[in-house]
Image (cartoon, helix red, strand yellow):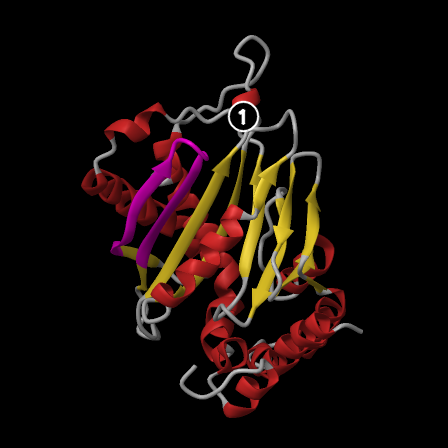
């Protein structure tokens, strides 16, 4: 077993007690057993970087050293064991000691998303649209029995790079219930292709987001479409055009995605906070595990 794999397994092993402590809150002992089995399977399935992770016929992720990838089947089983809903384009989860928690990798076969509207973006208007869409999505959250959220403001206003077709934006979210433990952040990254787009979404804390931005952007840069599937390969005569433009990935579509992430976060949102010691290495033992020194 190589060093990187041992590290990735150690991360999850350290977080497992945190996960199980939350799973114990579920009313069913059978549910906890399913979760524990799924977590153990996910631990064993971690694929450490550096390596290329194939993403169907669309592309690949050049997973850097220091990151681990939990494949679709094991990652989906882990999330489903706590009643979380997985989208059809879900590829897996990325873990790292650079992140407080997990980063979800998905592909949306929406068609070719036109990006002309990025030239005339109004950040204030986009924020209003995101707030309105999130409030509308709270009705679905109530039906699912998951916490309702509001959008407070930007951490990072939408930024689109027309040369690389990459979009990054980050918003502060706040739970409406009394149990909210501080403001959270959705750090969202996208790369557009000929037939759709990849997204990598990280839920973290406001206190941690500045430290985790570089890791999220490093992973975004490591995403690559295959030949023939790139944005520049679009054929207007034959290819499907998406029903929405780029702004929808910050507005209405994004509000629905926040809803999906809220559902995903039924156990992960707490895990990402409780498991921070294991992932970030704040404890002396974990710092030693990752070769870090106090004050590094």
Left or right of residue 74, residue 11 in this image:
left
Residue 145 visible:
no
> Which residue sits at x=33%, y=48%?
134
Which one is in front, 236 or 271? 236
In the rendering, at what x and y percent does residue 263 appear? 49, 58
- Left or right: where does residue 39 sit relative to residue 244? right
**In magenta stretch: residue 171:** yes
Name the residue beneath numbered marker 1: 111
* 165 is within the stretch colored magenta: yes
Q: Main secondary structure of the magenta part?
A: strand
**Crowd tier of the residue under label 1, counting other residues whose Cα lies within 10 Å: few below 14, some 14–19, many 20 or above:** some
User: Which region shows up in magenta?
Assistant: 152-172
Residue 259 versus residue 78 in the image, above or below: above
Judge whether residue 266 can be spotted in this image: yes
Where is residue 91? Give x, y as percent.
64, 49
Q: Residue furthest right?
A: 1
In this rendered view, identify the residue nearer to me: 179 or 15. 15
Q: Nearer the viewer, residue 38 or 23?
A: 38
């Amino acid at each position: 077993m190589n060093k990187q794999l041992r590290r990735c397994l150690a991360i999850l092993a350290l977080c497992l007690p945190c996960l199980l402590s939350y799973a114990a809150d579920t009313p069913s002992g059978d549910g906890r057993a399913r979760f524990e089995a799924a977590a153990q399977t996910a631990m064993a399935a971690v694929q450490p970087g550096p390596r290329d992770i194939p993403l169907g016929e669309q592309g690949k992720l050049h997973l850097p050293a220091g990151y681990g990838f939990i494949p679709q089947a094991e990652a989906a089983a882990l999330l489903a064991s706590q009643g979380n809903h997985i989208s059809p384009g879900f590829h897996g989860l990325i873990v790292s000691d650079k992140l407080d928690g997990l980063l979800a990798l998905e592909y949306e076969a929406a068609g070719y998303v036109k990006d002309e509207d990025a030239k005339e973006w109004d950040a204030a208007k986009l924020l209003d649209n995101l707030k309105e869409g999130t409030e509308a999505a709270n009705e679905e959250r109530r039906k699912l029995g998951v916490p309702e959220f509001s959008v407070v403001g930007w951490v990072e206003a939408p930024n689109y790079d027309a040369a690389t077709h990459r979009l990054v934006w980050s918003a502060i979210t706040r739970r409406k219930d009394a149990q909210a433990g501080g403001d959270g952040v959705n750090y969202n990254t996208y790369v557009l292709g000929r037939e759709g787009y990849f997204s990598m979404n990280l839920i973290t804390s406001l206190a941690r987001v500045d430290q985790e931005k570089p890791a999220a952007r490093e992973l975004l840069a490591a995403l690559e479409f295959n030949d023939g599937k790139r944005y520049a390969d679009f054929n207007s005569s034959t290819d499907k055009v998406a029903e929405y433009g780029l702004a929808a990935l910050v507005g209405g579509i994004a509000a629905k995605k926040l809803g999906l992430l809220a559902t995903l976060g039924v156990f992960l949102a707490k895990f990402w906070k409780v498991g921070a010691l294991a992932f970030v290495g704040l404890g002396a033992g974990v710092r030693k595990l990752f070769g870090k020194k106090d004050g590094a």
